[in-house]
Amino acid sequence: MDITSTSSRTEGSTDTREASGLVVYVCRSCRDEAEPNAEPRPGALLAKAAIALGTDANVEVRSVNCLANCKRGASAAMRTADGWSYVFGGLTPENAEDLITGARLLSTSTDGLMPWRGRPDSLKRGMVARIPPLNFVEETS
Ligand code: FES
């Protein structure tokens, strides 16, 4: 992992901005697996590209130091206030537009899930996890 010692809490950089729609968190620290010392890092390139494409009324893109998915980088996560959250890996800087497409699909979803139909391939094969909303209770019968 590349979590280093950059806890946002200890550095006082915790971002407390309100998010009204969906936030895409892109790990800016993910390295190139074949060339781990290469700069700029693929994560930084992905974050920069997604931020350049991403912000509108419903979607905001922020970079983050590490999502603890370093073995499957480049990585990104998507969160909404009351829908499902997603973690993706195996991304490349060329997938920035895919992240925005997926974010817009999720932000307009009526059931809080990112639809499979229309989802970019990188967000299908690169899905690491989906996490239910805080108040989610699954019916089991
Ligand atoms: S460096 Fe850890 S998820 Fe990117």
Image (tube, helix red, strand yellow):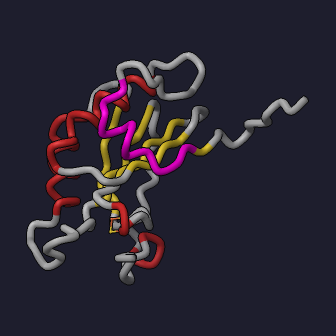
Quadrant of the drawing holding the N terminus: bottom left
Identify the residue shown where x is 31% and y is 59%: 27
* The one of 125 and 101 positioned closer to us in this rendering: 125
Is residue 126 magenta-colored?
A: yes
Quadrant of the drawing holding the C terminus: top right
Farthest residue toward the left?
Answer: 39
Identify the residue shown where x is 45% and y is 30%: 21
Identify the residue shown where x is 53% and y is 42%: 85
Query: In what quadrant does ligand 1 lie?
Result: bottom left
Identify the residue shown where x is 27% and y is 65%: 30
Q: Is residue 37 left or right of residue 31?
A: left
Query: Residue 75, position in %: x, y?
Result: 34, 55
* The one of 25 and 98 positioned closer to us in this rendering: 98
Is residue 127 placed above or below 114 in the rendered structure? below
Is residue 108 placed above or below 75 in the rendered structure? above
Q: Is residue 52 left or right of residue 81?
A: left
Q: Is residue 92 left or right of residue 12?
A: left
Is residue 112 magenta-colored?
A: no
* The one of 66 and 92 positioned closer to us in this rendering: 92
Q: Is residue 134 left or right of residue 87?
A: right
Query: Residue 120, position in %: x, y?
Result: 30, 30
Callout count: 0
Query: Residue 10, position in %: x, y?
Result: 45, 78
Q: Which residues are magenta?
A: 119-130
Query: Residue 26, position in %: x, y?
Result: 31, 52
Say which quarter of the image contains residue 103: top left
Is residue 58 placed above or below 96 in the rendered structure? above
Is residue 85 placed above or below 110 in the rendered structure? below
